Image (cartoon, helix red, strand yellow):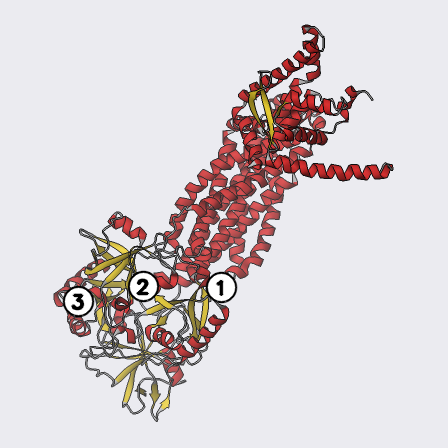
């Protein structure tokens, strides 16, 4: 499966969960989030910016993350996203739901 | 506060608008730079790296649109655009806008005025009272002393009853106040009127009202045997008369020229427990003493009426207490006062109008009037709905065009809604003006003696107006929006310029019918009240109601000056007899309908002819010779009194008494024993016509007259002067009488002098009010409905001009064309009238009890009202009809 085609496979809700998980470790800017997702998934989850930024905007509107301009390690000014308390709560819920679902799917597929 | 973070973000996007867009631009730019740098690192050259980065960034416009959509910006953008569009399109139709604003303004305003009138009477708890739900007003159900077969609910107690309940029932805080009276207050310079109520010492405590300044009455000041002239002021009175003077406590205030010390000011909102606002509270023990007939102090007589309240928070405790107080009230014995062993105490809510007592007729009338005002609102709404529908039909092509261009239905509805809301906002302003003006008139008309505490247009009224306007605009906007949504846009566009022309609309006809029906209902109401008023006015009271004056000297503080009055009255009577403009003069215990005594009478042989407390007890008035001539009564048989007739030797009886005691024969020369069976005979020397005793509407009662004793200084002595003035001479006679009385009674403060018509005007008020208000609202409704018919017909005509043109071109006559147009509206009018008749038949029961000798289904009134509606409808339709018939077919067809 080509990683380039993978972006359409990331459902909007899932993308938000992945972003939340990423920024739950530390505050990151948009490019770093995309890089982190690509690296951790071994290039499987390649998020197009056209989806990334609207997703971030949705998270901002829901109050799950906040954004602040700060200096990046390379010395460039970038907009950093930080997870909020309700964002963490949401992440926990989605993570549990995901676990439940993937476990169930795995059971059906006979891999456990 | 992360839930708040989201809202904060949206708001910042909303408020910073362009700046936020720039920030996003910068963020994407940063992203591109990172991406490009990464590309260069992986070996691409700068151009290639930039290109790849931009490609990977995707559709930027989409992102910006998404951001706007997510914030409320896009929605607000739309609202702003639609609002501007609505404003422009309304500017182009100023007539339409004015009609909607005016109609709705009147409808909502009049309803709001009635709301503001009834709100404090029926719904709103008295302000400033702590947990008003646990305060009860007490009522007593008793035998009606006038008609013993009936029981009546009284809202007040005499002091002995109050004191008995207080001592015998106990256990629950019981307080009382008197109905406020009007006093004159002098604070330095000139006097000004104020409302004063006397209260028990614990009144404020029971109600949980706190003093804003100073204190309330202490035990000493409320003790009945230690009168102390102290008062508490209301917050409003303190502000109006003392400009919030902080050194108010301890100052002196002169009430009816007597000095009182101000000891406190009540907390802000408290103005007593009634709609009638109190300015000054005084302890009960300084009630201006009117001694009883035997010189008893006021608190042993029935001079003072107290309205009791208790605070109970426990149902069981309340029931027990009510039982104990019922037992107490049955045991009350006061000389001369009818004690009632069947009386019972009833608890009621603090709002007097919701208590078990029959509502005052004025309030009963005003609830009907409120219903009428609501009908007005419906009529106005129907009218506006019609106007909006007509307008939306005209805009059909425009809407279809916009739909075809991809504007969503929601958006179109939003636009219609905004247009309606805009109109309603202006109408709300108009409604508040109408409410203020109507509200003030309604108060003056309905309760002129009551000084209502709440402002005519207060917070609750404003809320009412805004809520009504809001609900109204949504409902009203739905109609045209639904109509617009129904249409197939392509069909409409294909139909060309004549699209949006007339199609018979059931909704539009229905609205015309509704207006006609409701207007008819109001006209019928007006007719019934006018008829009742005329019937009441026609009642013969038995006196000359217009020229016979009853005069009574008045002294400051209501002191009893019986001896002086009894001496002065015969002297003044003698002098006035020769005065110009005077036809006859007499005096007695009371003038027409101004009082009487009750005592038993017997036929010879001690046969009771009627005992106290039964309906056959005659009322008796002691009068001088010439009394019947001066009051305009008629001597039917025998003769009038003459100066030589001794008291108790002769009596004159009314026709009803004569018939009940000596049926079938003449009463003249018969013997009647007064008061005690052992008393000597009084000979009947004459029979006079029956007269009314106290009310305009009452059953005929037996009456007797005896010669007045000029040396009697009690209430049965000469107390009032009766003068029959020549037509047009009333003012002269009054002036003369004042001079003559002043010569005899130097310190008399005023002479009360009035004709019977003036005295009974108060009793006619409910019918007069009903007639006035129903007529006013009825005319307004008919006017609005006529305007509705006019606008619908003229709209129809303008839409059907093409058809008219064809008709006229084919040789249709002026008459036929005009008749054709009028016929178009007669259908809905007919249906409306029919519905109105049905409604009036059904609703008759609601006003039946307020009418007098006219059936709620009076055919004359119905016919007249129907005829009025029909005439008005035809006249309203005639204007546009004539315009249609006069049109030049060539011009019309060319334009179309």
Of mark 1 and mark 2, the one earlier in the sequence is 2
Q: Residues within 10 Å of mark 2 (few under 14, many from 20)?
A: some
Query: Which of B263 and B358 lies nearest the eye of the viewer?
Result: B263
Residue at mark 2 to residue at mark 3: CA–CA distance? 22 Å
Query: Which of B872 and B54 lies nearest the eye of the viewer?
Result: B54
- Pick the quarter of the image with the C terminus of chain B: top right
The answer to which quarter of the image holds residue B263 is bottom left
* Percent x, y of residue B739: 15, 62
Query: Which of B786 and B714 lies nearest the eye of the viewer?
Result: B714
Q: Do the residues labelled 2 and 3 touch (CB within 8 Å)?
A: no
Of mark 1 and mark 3, the one earlier in the sequence is 3
Q: Does residue B760 appear in the picture of this structure?
A: no
Q: Chain for mark 2?
A: B
Residue at mark 1 to residue at mark 2: CA–CA distance? 24 Å
Residue at the spot of label 2: B759
Is B776 left or right of B639, judged from the image as shown? right
Residue B849's label in the rendered image is 1
Of mark 2 and mark 3, the one earlier in the sequence is 3
In the picture as drawn, the residue positioned furthest to the front comes out as A73
Q: Do the residues labelled 1 and 3 touch (CB within 8 Å)?
A: no
Q: Chain for mark 1?
A: B
């Amino acid at each position: 499966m080509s990683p380039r085609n993978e972006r359409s496979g990331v459902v909007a809700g899932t993308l938000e969960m992945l972003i939340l998980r990423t920024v739950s470790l530390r505050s990151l800017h948009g490019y770093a989030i995309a890089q982190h997702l690509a690296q951790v998934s071994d290039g499987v989850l390649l998020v197009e910016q056209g989806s990334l930024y609207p997703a971030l905007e949705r998270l901002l509107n829901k109050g799950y993350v906040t954004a602040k301009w700060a200096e990046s390690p390379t010395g460039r000014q970038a907009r950093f996203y930080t997870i909020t308390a309700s964002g963490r709560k949401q992440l926990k819920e989605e993570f549990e739901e995901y676990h439940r679902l993937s476990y169930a799917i795995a059971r059906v597929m006979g891999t456990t | 506060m992360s839930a708040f973070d989201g809202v904060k973000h949206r708001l910042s996007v909303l408020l910073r608008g362009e700046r936020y867009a720039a920030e996003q631009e910068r963020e994407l730019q940063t992203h591109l730079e990172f991406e490009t740098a990464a590309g260069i690192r992986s070996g691409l050259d700068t151009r290639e790296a930039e290109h790849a980065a931009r490609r990977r960034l995707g559709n930027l416009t989409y992102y910006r649109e998404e951001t706007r959509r997510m914030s409320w910006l896009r929605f607000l953008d739309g609202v702003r655009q639609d609002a501007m569009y609505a404003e422009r399109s309304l500017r182009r139709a100023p007539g339409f806008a004015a009609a909607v604003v005016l109609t709705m303004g009147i409808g909502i305003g009049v309803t709001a005025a009635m709301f503001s009138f009834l709100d404090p009477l029926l719904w709103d708890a008295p302000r400033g009272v702590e947990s008003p739900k646990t305060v009860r007003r007490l009522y007593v159900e008793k035998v009606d002393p006038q008609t013993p077969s009936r029981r009546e609910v009284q809202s007040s107690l005499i002091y002995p009853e109050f004191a008995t309940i207080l001592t015998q029932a106990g256990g629950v805080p019981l307080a009382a106040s008197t109905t406020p009276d009007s006093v004159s207050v002098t604070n330095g310079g000139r006097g000004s009127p104020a409302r004063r109520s006397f209260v028990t010492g614990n009144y404020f405590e029971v109600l949980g009202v706190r003093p804003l300044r100073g204190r309330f009455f202490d035990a000493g000041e409320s003790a009945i045997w230690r009168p102390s002239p102290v008062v508490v002021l209301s917050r409003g009175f303190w502000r109006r008369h003392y400009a919030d003077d902080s050194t108010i406590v301890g100052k002196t205030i002169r009430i009816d020229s007597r000095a009182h010390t101000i000891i406190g000011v009540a907390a802000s909102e408290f103005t007593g427990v009634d709609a009638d606002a109190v300015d000054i509270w005084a302890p009960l023990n300084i009630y201006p003493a009117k001694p009883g007939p035997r010189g008893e102090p006021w608190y042993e007589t029935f001079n003072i009426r107290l309205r009791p309240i208790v605070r109970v928070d426990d149902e069981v405790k309340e029931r027990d207490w009510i039982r104990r107080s019922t037992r107490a009230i049955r045991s009350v014995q006061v000389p001369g006062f009818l004690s009632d062993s069947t009386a019972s105490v009833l608890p009621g809510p603090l709002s007097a109008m919701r208590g078990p007592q029959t509502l005052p007729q004025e309030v009963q009338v005003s609830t009907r009037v409120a219903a009428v005002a609501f009908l007005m609102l419906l009529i106005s709404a129907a009218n506006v709905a019609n106007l909006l529908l007509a307008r939306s039909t005209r805009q059909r092509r425009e809407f279809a065009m916009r739909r075809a261009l991809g504007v969503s239905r929601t958006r179109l509805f939003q636009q219609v809604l905004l247009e309606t809301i805009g109109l309603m906002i202006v109408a709300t302003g108009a409604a508040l003006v109408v409410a203020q003006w109507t509200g003030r008139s309604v108060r003056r008309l309905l309760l002129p003696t009551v000084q209502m505490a709440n402002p005519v247009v207060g917070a609750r009224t404003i809320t009412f107006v805004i809520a009504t306007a809001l609900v109204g605009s949504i409902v009203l906007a739905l109609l045209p929006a639904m109509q617009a949504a129904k249409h197939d846009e392509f069909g409409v566009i294909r139909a060309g310029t004549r699209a949006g022309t007339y199609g018979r609309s059931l909704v539009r006809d229905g609205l015309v019918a509704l207006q006609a029906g409701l207007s008819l209902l109001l006209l019928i109401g007006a007719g019934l009240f006018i008829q009742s008023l005329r019937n009441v006015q026609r009642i013969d009271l038995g006196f000359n109601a217009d020229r016979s004056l009853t005069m009574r000297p008045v002294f400051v503080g209501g002191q009893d000056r019986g001896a002086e009055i009894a001496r002065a009255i015969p002297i003044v009577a003698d002098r006035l007899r020769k005065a110009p403009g005077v036809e006859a003069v007499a005096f007695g215990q009371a003038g027409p309908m101004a009082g009487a005594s009750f005592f038993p009478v017997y036929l010879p042989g001690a046969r009771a002819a009627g005992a106290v407390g039964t309906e056959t007890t005659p009322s008796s008035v002691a009068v001088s010779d010439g009394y019947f001539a001066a009051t305009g009564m008629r001597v039917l048989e025998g003769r009038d009194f003459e100066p030589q007739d001794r008291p108790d030797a002769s009596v004159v009886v009314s026709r009803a008494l004569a018939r009940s005691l000596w049926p079938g024969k003449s009463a003249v020369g018969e013997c009647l024993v007064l008061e005690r069976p052992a008393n000597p005979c009084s000979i009947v020397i004459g029979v006079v016509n029956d007269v009314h005793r106290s009310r305009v509407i009452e059953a005929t009662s037996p009456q007797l007259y005896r010669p007045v004793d000029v040396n009697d200084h009690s209430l049965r002595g000469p107390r009032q002067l009766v003068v029959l003035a020549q037509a047009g001479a009333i003012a002269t006679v009054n002036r003369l009488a004042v001079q003559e009385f002043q010569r005899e009674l130097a310190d008399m403060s005023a002479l009360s002098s009035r004709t019977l018509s003036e005295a009974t005007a108060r009793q006619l008020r409910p019918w007069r009010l009903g007639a006035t208000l129903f007529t006013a609202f009825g005319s307004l409704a008919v006017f609005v409905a006529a305007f509705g018919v006019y606008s619908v017909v003229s709209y129809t005509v303008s839409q059907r001009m093409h058809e008219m043109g064809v008709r006229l071109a084919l040789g249709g006559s002026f008459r036929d064309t005009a008749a054709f147009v009028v016929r178009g509206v007669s259908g809905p009018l007919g249906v409306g009238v029919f519905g109105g008749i049905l409604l009036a038949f059904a609703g008759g029961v609601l006003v039946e009890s307020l009418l007098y000798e006219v059936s709620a289904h009076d055919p004359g009134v119905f016919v007249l009202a129907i005829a009025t509606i029909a005439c008005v409808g035809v006249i309203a339709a005639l204007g546009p009809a004539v315009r249609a018939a006069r049109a030049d077919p060539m011009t019309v067809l060319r334009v179309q």
